[in-house]
Image: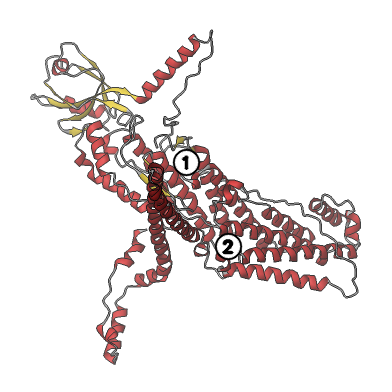
């Protein structure tokens, strides 16, 4: 992934004769030799260089606007505090004037960021096929985070080890997060985000105890408005990364070439996975500080992704339907009507939040696919009308589809047997199709961003012309009857969208800080005593201790009056090192052999004592509360629960385990 960025840092010296304006034959030969020395892979990078530059320029511009918005919001907060605190009328007038300027600048910055984030054209496919563009979602931006001091202090205080031994691991973690900020728009970028998301499970277990925060602040910006949010809970970091996973799936889906079934299937899979990521985020993360991760916003995004899946299903059926008979065209009409029903952004809470270009695009698509449903119905009536000489079986099939299409029309047999009635009904549908196409073009013309999308203009114009031409064919000079109103088409789909939840176990990760020891014992929830060094001398009765378990090995018993007891070894100690050799991950047999092979001068053991574990304390508290509730149930019912400001956390299996266990975090618990 990082290889494609190196081209930006490569400096190439240009021949001076080029710059001076004197261009001779020798200069031309110099340029030819210079070009011949460039490796073939460089041309490969140059081919994709414009696309890379676009993404980098957009990211740089978005980061700049986010910083300016953050600055203006801090200025506004300070001015509002001053306005409330002062009693001087002149100062209040000055502050009010300054507030008006700040609010004006903030509005302009938000509009600029909205135009940047709602730009759909840059994520579309390069294929020459004419397809309706899809709506992708931009990634959330974040600031750099320096874990060095916080993790080093925690290792020294909590684990009692030399933090300098973990500089390599801390650097690896920071490099992983830095790379995660700018993932590539492909499967490698998704795996990178998944890797960091899974790594945060270990990070949470190692360095984020429930009773205190690590002192690291995570800054993320709203993906649409750019409003900054800052929290020190790792749940906020995880939720933001999961949001970016869903957003990246939307960009991959919009990028697919939907002129072939393979590209359509990839787009369907990407949009279904995006819907699954947003749905998982909505179900497992609560009290989000930013609007893009709020429940109404995530519900809107899930419905939007499902609608785009349904749109891809319609395109695949259109592409794979070779025999355009009466029933197949009515099926297409029902599929198009199904797509047009997805009104994803009509909620009152979302109207002021979503970009105007998104709302306009959804309305354009709704009108466009409603027009297509009427068009295919009209073509079915006009070009493939059922004749009286058709077989009874074919007529019954057509009648069944016709009944599904028009559940309110009772005279099915008369319309199917009468060509003139079918023609008039088809003409009515074409009239509705033309009206819908014109409405889609009108809504399209009202949005500046959509007007810049030539491919959308081409699709709308082409479909409108096709319906007009078909209507002109049916329009007769001697037909003075007023065109009837076409009935509504009953929608139906043969493939319902499937919301695919994220598969975190698909990307296997290794705990970066596994050198600290097994996670079940050496975690942030455990309370340790300081490391003690015990010098054991073998006596006549041996070392005088009993071992149990492995990784790490536990001192299960100490013989009273034995060598171990006299040296200060206690029951319940964990052996972490023998003669300076780390053995946190050592098996039981390995530790026994190391102790047996000790010389006459004895052996030096490094041990630690586990005083308490927060999970055990929580269990004791729960048992105590249950006993209290039972005791007082005679008089009145008392329900004891955790405080509302505590971090709600359900146990989750490691990401490399089998299956996906549930997790639930209250993001604002420690805000």
Left or right of residue 395: residue 180: left
Q: Quadrant of residue 43?
A: bottom left
Q: Position of residue 642 (x, y in %)?
A: 44, 25
Q: Position of residue 541 (x, y in %)?
A: 15, 14
Residue at 47% of width from left, 52% of height from top? 223
As helix, strand or loop, the secondary structure at mark 1 comes to loop
Q: Position of residue 362 (x, y in %)?
A: 62, 57
In the displayed structure, 356 sits above or below 619; it is below
As helix, strand or loop, the secondary structure at mark 2 comes to loop
Q: Position of residue 622 (x, y in %)?
A: 43, 19
Q: Residue furthest bottom?
A: 25
Q: Residue furthest left?
A: 601
The answer to whether one can see residue 560 in this image is: yes
In the displayed structure, 28 sits above or below 57; it is below
Marks 1/2: CA–CA distance: 30 Å
The answer to whether one can see residue 500 in this image is: no
Residue hosting label 2: 133
Residue hosting label 1: 288
Left or right of residue 631: residue 438: right
Dot 1 alpha-carbon crowd within 10 angstroms: few under 14, some 14 to 19, many 20 or more: some
In the displayed structure, 434 sits above or below 230; it is below
């Amino acid at each position: 992934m990082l290889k494609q960025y190196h081209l930006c840092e490569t400096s190439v010296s240009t021949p001076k004769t080029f710059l001076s304006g004197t261009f001779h034959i020798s200069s031309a030969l110099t340029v030819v030799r210079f070009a011949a020395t460039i490796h073939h892979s460089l041309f490969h990078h140059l081919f994709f260089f414009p696309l890379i530059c676009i993404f980098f320029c957009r990211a740089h511009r978005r980061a700049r606007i986010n910083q300016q918005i953050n600055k203006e919001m801090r200025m506004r907060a300070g001015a509002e505090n001053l306005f409330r605190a002062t009693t001087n009328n002149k100062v209040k007038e000055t502050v009010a004037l300054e507030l008006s300027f700040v609010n004006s600048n903030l509005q302009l910055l938000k509009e600029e960021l909205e135009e940047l984030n709602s730009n759909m054209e840059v994520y579309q496919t390069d294929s020459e096929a004419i397809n309706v563009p899809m709506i992708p979602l931009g990634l959330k931006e974040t600031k750099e985070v320096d874990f060095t001091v916080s993790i080093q202090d925690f290792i020294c205080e909590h684990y009692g080890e030399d933090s300098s031994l973990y500089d390599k691991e801390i650097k690896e973690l920071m490099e992983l997060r830095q790379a995660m900020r700018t993932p590539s728009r492909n499967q490698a970028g998704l795996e990178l985000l998944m890797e960091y998301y899974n790594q945060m499970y270990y990070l949470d277990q190692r360095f984020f105890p429930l009773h205190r925060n690590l002192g690291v602040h995570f800054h993320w910006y709203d993906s649409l408005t750019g409003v900054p949010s800052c929290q020190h809970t790792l749940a906020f970091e995880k939720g933001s990364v999961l949001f970016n996973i869903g957003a990246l799936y939307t960009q991959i889906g919009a990028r697919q070439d939907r002129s072939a079934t393979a590209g359509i299937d990839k787009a369907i899979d990407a949009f279904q996975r995006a819907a699954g990521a947003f749905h998982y985020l909505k179900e497992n993360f609560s009290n989000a500080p930013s609007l893009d991760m709020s429940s109404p916003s995530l519900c809107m995004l899930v419905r939007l992704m499902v609608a785009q899946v349904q749109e891809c299903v319609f395109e695949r059926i259109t592409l794979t339907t070779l025999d355009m008979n009466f029933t197949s065209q009515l099926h297409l009409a029902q599929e198009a009507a199904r797509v047009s029903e997805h009104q994803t952004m009509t909620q009152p809470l979302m109207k002021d939040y979503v970009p105007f270009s998104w709302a306009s695009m959804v309305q354009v698509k709704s009108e466009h696919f409603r027009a297509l449903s009427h068009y295919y119905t009209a073509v079915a009536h006009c070009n493939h009308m059922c004749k009286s000489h058709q077989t009874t079986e074919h007529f019954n099939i057509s009648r069944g589809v016709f009944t599904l299409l028009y559940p309110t029309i009772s005279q099915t047999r008369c319309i199917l047997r009468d060509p003139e009635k079918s023609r008039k009904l088809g003409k009515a549908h074409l009239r509705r199709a033309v009206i819908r196409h014109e409405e889609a073009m009108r809504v399209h013309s009202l949005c500046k961003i959509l007007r810049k999308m030539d491919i959308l203009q081409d699709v709308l114009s082409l479909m409108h012309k096709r319906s007009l031409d078909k209507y002109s064919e049916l329009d007769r000079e001697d037909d003075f009857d007023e065109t009837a109103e076409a009935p509504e088409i009953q929608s139906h789909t043969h493939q319902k969208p499937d919301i695919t939840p994220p598969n975190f176990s698909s990307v296997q990760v290794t705990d970066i800080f596994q050198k600290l020891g097994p996670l079940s014992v050496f975690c942030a929830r455990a309370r340790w005593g300081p490391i003690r060094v015990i010098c054991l001398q073998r006596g006549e009765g041996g070392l005088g201790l009993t071992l149990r378990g492995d990784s790490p090995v536990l001192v299960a018993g100490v013989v009273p009056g034995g060598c171990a007891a006299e040296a200060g070894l206690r029951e319940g100690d964990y052996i972490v090192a023998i003669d300076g050799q780390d053995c946190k991950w050592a098996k039981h047999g390995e530790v026994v052999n190391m102790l047996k092979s000790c010389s006459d001068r004895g052996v030096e053991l490094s041990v630690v004592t586990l005083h308490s574990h927060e999970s055990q304390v929580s269990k004791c508290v729960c048992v105590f509360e249950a006993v209290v509730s039972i005791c007082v149930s005679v008089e009145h019912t008392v329900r004891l629960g955790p405080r509302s400001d505590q971090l709600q956390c359900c146990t989750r299996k490691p990401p490399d385990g089998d299956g996906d266990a549930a997790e639930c975090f209250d993001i604002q618990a420690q805000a």
